[in-house]
Amino acid sequence: MYFFEKALEFIFLPCCGVCGKLGESYLCKKCGKELEKYVVYSQEETIKLHVFQYKDLVRKLILDYKFNDKSYLYKTFCEFIVKNKKILDFIKSYDIIIPVPMHPARIRKRGYNQSALLAKELAKSLEMKVYTNVLLKIKNNKVQSTLNKKEREENTKNVYKLVKPEKIKNKKILLLDDIYTTGATVNACVKELQKASVKKIGIFTIAKD
């Protein structure tokens, strides 16, 4: 698989996900500096880390990533993340990365789970484990972005289900999502993951609204 990926990279040169410049990187130096303007590295307590402010360029990239078929942007976000020691130290303090799951019907419609793509790329880059079959979304609920805070909390009840809890028992779990707004989604996931008697649960998001 590694040699196949390298062969594809040789045939199709990587391009910057922000400006489209062809080169050796999925994030050119110029655009990397531009993204730095939106960095917050907001670390709440010791278990939550958010990389960017959700506005302007970052907001556009995430919306394109989720809704405009630009799935390749996971490589751009990953490249930015792995170059930052503070973020890496935070991620590496956990044993397993688990992306917030999507309902199968929504995955079929979109074609991919944006959180899972980033989680897998980070896990590969950092030689960590990633599990996408431990936490499932069993209810195709309303889209969170259309709801207020109270409605979001109600909308996430009984939506996620823990399966194969033995795979994460006594482990330090990092839950990965794209945007942190009210915390309703990640809180619902954390509540379910805690049933596995995990050692610790952290939250990592690309941006905070």
Image (cartoon, rainbow, N blue to C red):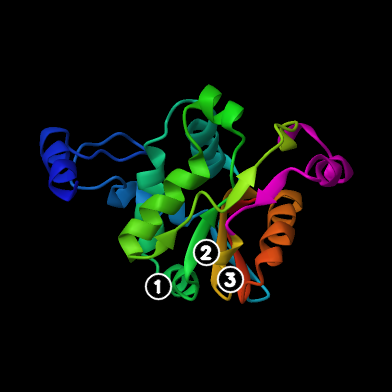
Judge from the rendering whether residue 192 lies leftward or rightward of residue 40; answer left or right: right
Residue closer to the observer: 27 or 141: 141
Q: Please tell me which residue is depicted at 35% across the width and 39% down the height of the picture.
A: 17
Residue 124 is marked as none
- How packed is label 2: few (under 14 Cα within 10 Å), some, or many (20 or more)? some
Q: Disc 2 marks which amino acid? A: Lys
Q: Please tell me which residue is depicted at 28% across the width and 47% down the height of the picture.
A: 28
Q: Secondary structure at mark 2?
A: helix
Q: Position of residue 83 (x, y in %)?
A: 35, 64
Residue closer to the observer: 21 or 170: 170
Q: Which residue is mark 1?
A: 85
Q: Please tell me which residue is depicted at 54% across the width and 22% down the height of the picture.
A: 109
Vertical order, 136 against 82 (above or below)? above
- Residue 17 magenta-highlighted: no
Q: Earlier in the sequence, mark 2 or mark 1?
A: 1
Vertical order, 40 against 57 (above or below)? below
Residue 169 is marked as 3
Q: Which residue is mark 2?
A: 167
Residue 10 placement: quadrant: top left
CA gap, disc 2 to disc 1?
28 Å
Q: Secondary structure at mark 3?
A: loop
Q: Disc 3 marks which amino acid? A: Lys
Q: Disc 1 marks which amino acid? A: Lys
CA gap, disc 3 to disc 2?
6 Å
Residue range corresponding to the magenta coloring: 145-164
Q: Earlier in the sequence, mark 1 or mark 3?
A: 1
